[in-house]
Amino acid sequence: MLWESLPLGERVIPLSPISHGRALLTIAAILGCTAYFLPWLDVHAPDTWRIHGVDLGRRILWPHAVLAAWVVIVPTAVSRRSLGGLLAARAVLVTLALVPLVTLAVLGLRPPKHLLVHVEVTWLWGAALEAFASILGVFAAIRLGRRGRR
């Protein structure tokens, strides 16, 4: 029986992370995990602090969701064995890929403040790489399950 004539739920796809758009999503997740440990902010008050994604997670807990989202994306995308399962996981994967972008947007809209001291925040390349990985992950998750050029 031809592969195209099978229902989506029965179309078994290879387990390799390269097929059906999973490679780009895996690359985005690796980039995002790496960027989480790179410097995100320079905070200039009387002293200067360089803050990484991990440091933000220690100070306020919700930035740890960025790393959790990237860690969950890879097994969720790679473990889908049928084309129907891969297509059904798209919405979840898009949502998970948006977590870093939403986190950076919240940090950008509400930067650190202090009542007595003027605090200046400078964004660093780790945050830019995290945003790029998030946008790449959203793009890859939307295209997930599509076959390459024939």
Image: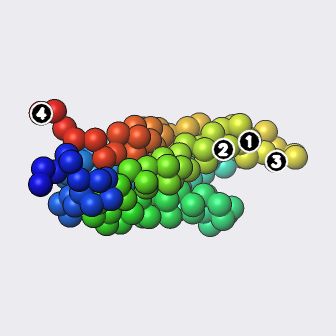
**29 or 94: nearer the viewer:** 94
Q: Which residue is mark 4?
A: 150
Q: Residues within 10 Å of mark 2 (few under 14, many from 20)?
A: few
**CA–CA distance between discs 2 and 4?**
43 Å
Question: For numbered disc 4, what is the local secondary structure?
Answer: loop
**CA–CA distance between discs 3 and 4?**
58 Å
**CA–CA distance between discs 3 and 2?**
15 Å
Q: Amino acid at mark 4?
A: Arg
Question: Would you say residue 126 is visible in this rendering?
Answer: no
Which label sits on residue 107?
2
Q: Which residue is mark 3?
A: 114
Does the CB distance between marks 1 and 2 fall below 8 Å? Answer: yes
**CA–CA distance between discs 4 and 1?**
47 Å
Q: Amino acid at mark 1?
A: Arg
Does the CB distance between marks 4 and 1 fall below 8 Å? Answer: no
Question: For numbered disc 3, what is the local secondary structure?
Answer: loop
Q: Residues within 10 Å of mark 3 (few under 14, many from 20)?
A: few
Residue occupying the point 34% across, 45% down: 144
Q: Mark 3 or 4 closer to N-term?
A: 3
Specify whether 101 is left or right of 71.
right
Q: Nearer the viewer, mark 3 or mark 2?
A: 2
Q: Amino acid at mark 2?
A: Leu
Q: Mark 2 or 4 closer to N-term?
A: 2
**21 or 35: nearer the viewer:** 21
Residue 64 x/y as whole percent: 57, 63
Q: Nearer the viewer, mark 4 or mark 1?
A: 4
Question: Which residue is farthest right?
Answer: 115
Residue occupying the point 57% across, 60% down: 65
Residue 66 x/y as whole percent: 53, 56
Split into 4 quadrants, where in the image is the N terminus? bottom left
Q: Which residue is mark 1?
A: 110
Specify whether 147 is left or right of 36.
left
